[in-house]
Image (tube, helix red, strand yellow):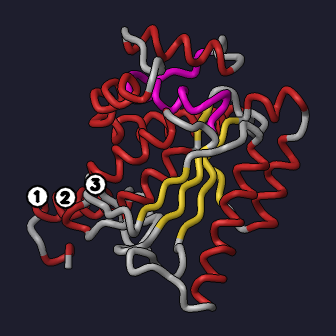
């Protein structure tokens, strides 16, 4: 096709083709459903509930469950139990009209901070594999993902959850965790920047891959993967960031 075009049109066609080729593959298909179990009880569930509302996804297709344990292994176990409980209700034909019969994507949103320091991170990864639960993990903690909404950084002093939360609070210029109301107000302000956070998270991942940093790299986050999947579950014309279908 391009061979029959004038040179300037051929160049334009080539650039467009390269731009399309550079798009990431879709992480989900339109209409896919999600189970998201979070380690935190306030910040993480509020973030994903606000994101679901912003993307105009329903509570039927995106179910967010706040964690009840700080140990990521319990979060993974909770996700697997929810999947099994739904399967039992389906088998007994006791599924509510507001429920789906299965989830296309099952995620645990966890921090690596404690697991790294206490030496059981490999157990976390293995448990997720065994129970078929995907990990949206952040190192040291979820606030690093939030920090990427405001700026790109791979600063080396984010050594634990406390320092990362303080760094995010300072960058945000306000408190965000006094109570649920404070969290909702702060995250509503932050949320429109999620496409920037996705780009920044991908750049951070590339930075660590180039440097050969052992996983989980500090600081880093995989939360962009679940956010992209939620975006990709929309019809193509409604997606906030583009992708190419697999």
Residue at the spot of label 3: 55
Q: Residue at x 60, y 82 (%)?
A: 89
Quarter of the N terminus within the rendering? bottom left
Across and down, in percent, residue 209 comes to 66, 39
Using residue 242 as the reference point, say whether residue 156 is left or right of it.
right
- Tell me the SS state at disc 3: loop
Residue density around tag 3, few if under 14, some if 14–19, many if 20 or more, within 10 Å: some
Across and down, in percent, residue 193 comes to 31, 34
Q: Find residue 59 and report its image quarter.
A: bottom left
- Range shown magenta: 138-155
Residue at the spot of label 2: 11
Using residue 100 as the reference point, say whether residue 215 is left or right of it.
right
- Name, please, the residue furthest toward the right: 119
Return the residue nearer the eye: 16 or 1.
16
Report the mark closest to the observer, 2 or 3.
3
Is 159 situated above or below 216? above
Q: Is residue 236 magenta?
A: no
Q: Earlier in the sequence, mark 3 or mark 1?
A: 1
Residue at the spot of label 1: 8
- Tell me the SS state at disc 2: helix
Residue density around tag 2, few if under 14, some if 14–19, many if 20 or more, within 10 Å: few
Q: Residue at x 76, y 66 (%)?
A: 131
Report the mark closest to the observer, 3 or 1.
3
What separation in Å lies between label 2 and label 1 (alpha carbons)?
5 Å
Across and down, in percent, residue 213 comes to 74, 33
Q: Residue at x 82, y 58 (%)?
A: 127
């Amino acid at each position: 096709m391009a061979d029959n075009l004038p040179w300037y049109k051929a160049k334009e066609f080539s650039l467009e083709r390269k731009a399309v080729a550079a798009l990431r593959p879709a992480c989900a298909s339109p209409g896919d459903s999600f189970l998201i179990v979070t380690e935190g009880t306030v910040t993480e569930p509020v973030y994903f509930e606000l994101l679901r509302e912003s993307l105009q996804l329903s509570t039927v297709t995106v179910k967010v469950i706040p964690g009840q344990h700080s140990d990521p292994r319990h979060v993974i176990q909770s996700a697997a139990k929810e999947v099994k409980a739904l399967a039992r209700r389906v088998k007994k034909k006791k599924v509510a009209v507001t429920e789906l019969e299965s989830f296309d994507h099952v995620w645990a949103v966890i921090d690596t901070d404690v697991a790294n320091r206490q030496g059981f991170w490999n157990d976390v990864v293995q448990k997720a594999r065994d129970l078929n639960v995907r990990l949206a993990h952040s190192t040291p903690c979820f606030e690093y993902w939030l920090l990427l909404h405001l700026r790109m950084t791979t600063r080396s002093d984010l050594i634990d959850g406390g320092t990362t939360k303080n760094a995010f609070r300072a960058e945000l210029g306000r408190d965000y965790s006094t109570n649920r109301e404070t969290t909702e107000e702060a995250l509503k302000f932050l949320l429109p920047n999620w496409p920037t956070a996705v780009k920044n998270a991908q750049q951070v991942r590339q930075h660590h891959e180039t440097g050969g940093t052992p996983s989980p790299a500090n600081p880093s986050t995989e939360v962009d993967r679940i956010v992209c999947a939620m975006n990709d579950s929309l019809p193509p014309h409604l997606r906030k960031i583009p992708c190419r279908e697999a």
